[in-house]
Image (cartoon, rainbow, N blue to C red):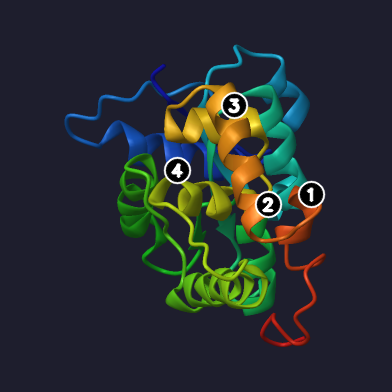
Amino acid sequence: MTIAIQVMSSHPLLTRAVEKILAHLNNFPFPILPPASSESEASSRVNCPRLFLLDDCSLRTDLGPLAARCRTHSPGSKFLALLSTGDVSHAEKIRLFYWGIDGFVEFHKTWQAELPHAIQSVLKGQFWAPPEVLLEFAKHARTLLESQLVSGNSLTRRESQVLQLLMRRLTNKEISCALGISERTTKFHVSNVLSKLQLEDRRCVSPDKFSMKGFFAGT
């Protein structure tokens, strides 16, 4: 199913600015939905997968759980957080990344030039996040493997992909959408990952459940 793009913001000036940016993208094959001023308005529309552009300044809610709820309603969705420059700390971006936010664009002087690149990157399955965020994520995955992996075992390439999505709180249905596999196959891989890592359930792979003192920068 083709992914659509939708800005979620209650700020009319921002929504118009984003619409103008999207209108000028050449040969852009993705449908653009009308902006939604709130989560309820976005949820009331067709539940196709979307790239949500979440305006942190006007939504006044935690973008992490918001992204999780949107994914539940529209599996396969992706998320770009639009942030006020300097208002969101390094540790906060890491936390949001673990909630499934795929990228961050701050409202600096060149944000309108940056946004199209961020959108295209995320739609290709890449991240648009500071290197420090991706480094912390990789360190967490490595720590999990080094401390929990049963001796003599290793994760397959697909299991490694599943682990990364588990770390970002995706459900089995969301993982199956992201990887293009059936939910039954996803359950099989999840079970293998947890068994090889000697973990009771999927919650144990998140940094707030897995014991790593001082994992987050600034904590």
**Can residue 52 be seen from the camera position used here?**
yes
Please say if the residues under marks 4 and 1 sit with CB atoms less than 8 Å apart: no
Q: CA distance from mark 3 to mark 2?
A: 23 Å
Q: Looking at the image, do the residues carrying marks 2 and 1 touch, with CB atoms under 8 Å apart? A: yes
Q: For the residues carrying marks 4 and 2, which lies nearer the camera in this image?
A: 2
Determine whether 140 is above or below 165 in the image.
Answer: below
Q: Mark 2 falls on what kind of element?
A: helix
Q: Amino acid at mark 2?
A: Leu
Specify whether 9 is left or right of 136. right
Q: Position of residue 103 (x, y in %)?
A: 49, 56
Residue at numbered disc 3: 75
Q: Earlier in the sequence, mark 4 or mark 2?
A: 4
Give the Cα separation between the discs numbered 4 and 2.
Answer: 45 Å
Sooner in the amino-acid sequence: mark 2 or mark 1: 2
Q: Residues within 10 Å of mark 1 (few under 14, many from 20)?
A: few
Most foreground residue, 144 or 105: 144
Query: x and y percent of residue 175 in the render?
Result: 56, 36
- Element at label 4: helix
Residue 194 — which label?
Answer: 2
Residue located at (48% from left, 76% from top): 135
Q: Quadrant of the N terminus?
A: top left
Is there CB contact under 8 Å for labels 4 and 2?
Answer: no
Q: Amino acid at mark 3?
A: Pro
Q: Is residue 173 above or below residue 207?
A: above
Q: Which residue is mark 4?
A: 17
Residue extending farthest to the front is 152
Residue 69's quadrant in the figure?
A: top right
Answer few, some or many: residues within 10 Å of disc 3's Cα (few below 14, many 20 plus, some between 14 and 19): many
Q: Nearer the viewer, mark 4 or mark 1?
A: 1
Label 4 vs label 3, nearer the camera: 3
The residue at which mark 1 appears reads as 201
Mark in front: 1 vs 3: 1
